[in-house]
Image (spheres, helix red, strand yellow):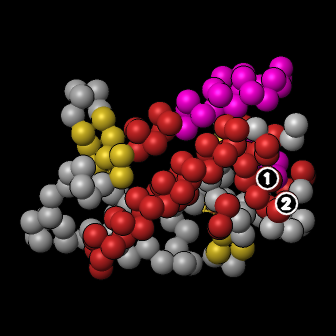
Amino acid sequence: MTKGSIPAVEDYRRLREEADAIAARLTEVHGSQIVCRAGCTDCCQNLSVWPVEFYAVLEDLRAAGCSHLVFDESASCGFLKDGLCQIYPFRPLICRTHGLPIAFEIETAEIAVSFCPKNFQDWEQKGLTFGPDNTLPIDRLNERLSQIHLCFLEESGDKFLTANSRIPLKKLVELL
Ligand code: SF4
């Protein structure tokens, strides 16, 4: 069985689609408050991801015939080339949330919201409030991803992987 045919990898791809759907809805809901554009790389940084995400991205790149990627060691994320992400269609889940209003639980069990400072520059003057309808529930997505990660460990039977395993995304360039 290749890692790409492991059921958890398909679950990961479904979660990725859900994240994209949420991102698209929030982008529509917030309209001009979100100024994220191609060429802005402020949120980009080198990442390590769980194996299920790594192997899904690897399989997707292979399926897309992407056999050669350049990793720029000097960039904030080595996959940036001329200010654009070389693996954009297959980028990890966290990259799909860049810039959006992210809702997360803090110690007091309250919900906090964070977003890129380039976005929502006049949200207070506009009287905008944030709630479940106009934020991205990152804790729920992370919890689902964590469950999928654990399923992947079991289904892959790979003895070298543990619950704490993270794989630097950079390793993709070696395996394509
Ligand atoms: S993978 Fe792409 S979107 Fe994600 S941090 Fe790197 S360059 Fe940015």
Asked if residue 132 lies left or right of residue 87, the reply is left
Neighbours of disc 1 within 10 Å: few (<14), some (14-19), many (20+): many
User: Percent position (x, y) of residue 108?
Assistant: 22, 27
- Location of residue 124 by image quarter: bottom left
Q: Residue at x 15, y 58 (%)?
A: 129
Magenta residues, as a range?
145-172
The label shown at residue 62 is 2
Q: Residue at x 40, y 38 (%)?
A: 139
Q: Find out whether residue 165 is within the magenta segment.
A: yes
Amino acid tagged 1: Leu
Q: Residue at x 80, y 67 (%)?
A: 64
For mark 1, give the secondary structure. helix
Q: Find out whether residue 55 is within the magenta segment.
A: no
For mark 2, give the secondary structure. helix
Asked if residue 53 lies left or right of residue 138, the reply is right
Amino acid tagged 2: Arg
User: Percent position (x, y) of residue 98?
Assistant: 47, 60
The label shown at residue 58 is 1
Question: Is residue 164 among the parts visible in the rendering?
Answer: no
| 124 versus 109 height, above or below | below
Question: Is residue 25 among the parts visible in the rendering?
Answer: yes
Pointers 1 and 2 in contact (CB under 8 A)? yes
| 95 versus 148 height, above or below | below
Q: CA distance from mark 1 to mark 2?
A: 6 Å
